[in-house]
Amino acid sequence: MIKAVLVMNTQGKPRLAKFYEFQPVEQQQEAIRNVFSVLCSRPENVSNFVDAESIFGPDSRLVYKHFATLYFVFIFDSSENELAMLDLIQGRL
């Protein structure tokens, strides 16, 4: 199940944030900050798949793609295929 879809710029400002599980606004903002801190600290030559258990709870994964000045991020659980999520990001752009 997809838990959230985020689009943010390279400064960490969210351009789109859709959470599919209820979270108060403060928790959503904290999650966005945590996701950005993880993404901006990763080198360009590493995998686009990240464990997101510390941010979104157990069994959570994060896949992202960096295009120009935007990060496209999907957060999901183990019932989804990581490569299918990456293909979903790349196929829609």
Image (spheres, rainbow, N blue to C red):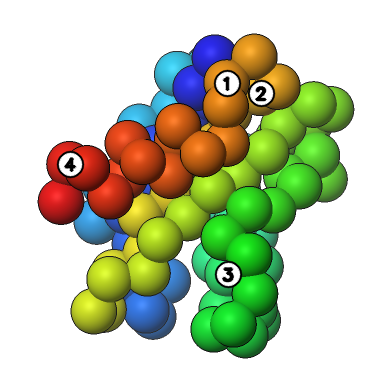
Q: Pointer 2: what residue? A: 77
Q: Position of residue 53 (x, y in %)?
A: 80, 39
Q: What type is the residue that disc 3 sits on?
A: Leu
Distance from disc 3 to disc 4, alpha carbons, whole Å, reads 21 Å
Q: Are marks 2 and 4 in contact (CB under 8 Å)?
A: no
Q: Earlier in the sequence, mark 3 or mark 2?
A: 3
Q: Nearer the viewer, mark 1 or mark 2?
A: 1
Q: What type is the residue that disc 2 sits on?
A: Asp
Distance from disc 3 to disc 1, alpha carbons, whole Å, reads 21 Å
Q: Earlier in the sequence, mark 3 or mark 4?
A: 3
Q: Pointer 4: what residue? A: 92
Q: Pointer 3: what residue? A: 39
| 75, 80: nearer the viewer | 80
- Visible residue check, residue 55: no
Q: Earlier in the sequence, mark 3 or mark 1?
A: 3
| Quadrant, the N terminus | top right
Looking at the image, residue 84 lies above or below residue 2: below
Relative placement, left or right, of 52 versus 93 is right
Judge the density around disc 1: few (<14), some (14-19), many (≥20) Cα neighbours within 10 Å.
Answer: few
Q: Nearer the viewer, mark 3 or mark 4?
A: 4
Q: Nearer the viewer, mark 3 or mark 1?
A: 1
Q: Hey, which residue is sitting farthest left in the picture?
A: 93
Distance from disc 2 to disc 4, alpha carbons, whole Å, reads 21 Å
| Residue drawn at 24 percent across, 56 percent down | 15
> Where on the picture, by quarter, is residue 13?
bottom left
Distance from disc 1 to disc 4, alpha carbons, whole Å, reads 17 Å
Q: Are marks 1 and 2 in contact (CB under 8 Å)?
A: yes
Q: Position of residue 71 (x, y in %)?
A: 37, 64
Distance from disc 3 to disc 2, alpha carbons, whole Å, reads 18 Å
Q: Pointer 1: what residue? A: 80
